[in-house]
Amino acid sequence: MKLIFVYNAKNGIFNSSLDFFHKILSPKTYPCTLYKLTHGSTKERDQWTKFIKETNQKIVFNNIDDFEERYRTSYNYPVIVREEEDQMRVIFSKEQIEKFKSIESLIEAIRSLNVVEIY
């Protein structure tokens, strides 16, 4: 089983550059709530890094392009899904992710689902 976090972002140098400047110049209007929860303006949040390191759950991070190419499916992004035995199940939809007010609330919600084990 693995958790797949799909950010509302696309690949490519142009898209990456556009995203970078959008995050810096107008972070409140950046369209990926999941990214805003897990990252500051230039790097991953310390609490998130610690959470990822402490879990023994396989966790994968994708942009839209990579996810759709690999899994041949699409969702309303961002989304967090669980893949188990070639079946996908939405853990948190875009609407649910938008309700989290902090990285701590996201981590607590993930832990409460008992989908991750902590060392």
Image: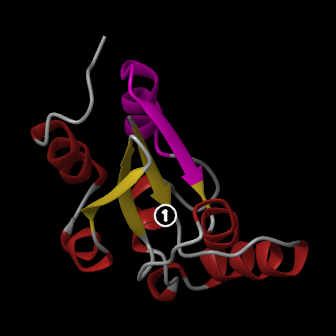
Farthest top residue in view: 119
Is residue 51 one of those drawn in magenta? Answer: yes
The crowding category of the residue bearing disc 1, from other C-alpha atoms within 10 Å (few below 14, some 14 to 19, many at least 20), is many
Does residue 46 sit above or below 97 in this rendering? above
Does residue 10 sit above or below 67 in this rendering? below
Residue at point 36%, 23% (across, down):
55
Q: Secondary structure at mark 1?
A: helix
| Quadrant location of the C terminus in the rendered image | top left
Whole-percent x and y of residue 45?
A: 47, 45
| Quadrant location of the N terminus in the rendered image | top left
Is residue 23 one of those drawn in magenta? Answer: no
Frontmost residue, 81 versus 29: 81
Left or right of residue 29: residue 84: left
Residue at point 44%, 53% (across, down):
38
- Number of callouts: 1
Frontmost residue, 81 versus 23: 81
Left or right of residue 109: residue 53: right
Whole-percent x and y of residue 35?
A: 49, 64
Frontmost residue, 8 versus 44: 8
Farthest left residue in view: 112
Residue at point 46%, 55% (across, down):
5
Whole-percent x and y of residue 79?
A: 39, 67
Does residue 54 sit above or below 48 in this rendering? above
Left or right of residue 2: residue 105: left
Highlighted range, magenta: 45-61
Q: Which residue is mark 1?
A: 35
Q: Quadrant of residue 72?
A: bottom right
Report the amino acid beneath label 1.
Answer: Tyr
Whole-percent x and y of residue 40?
A: 51, 57
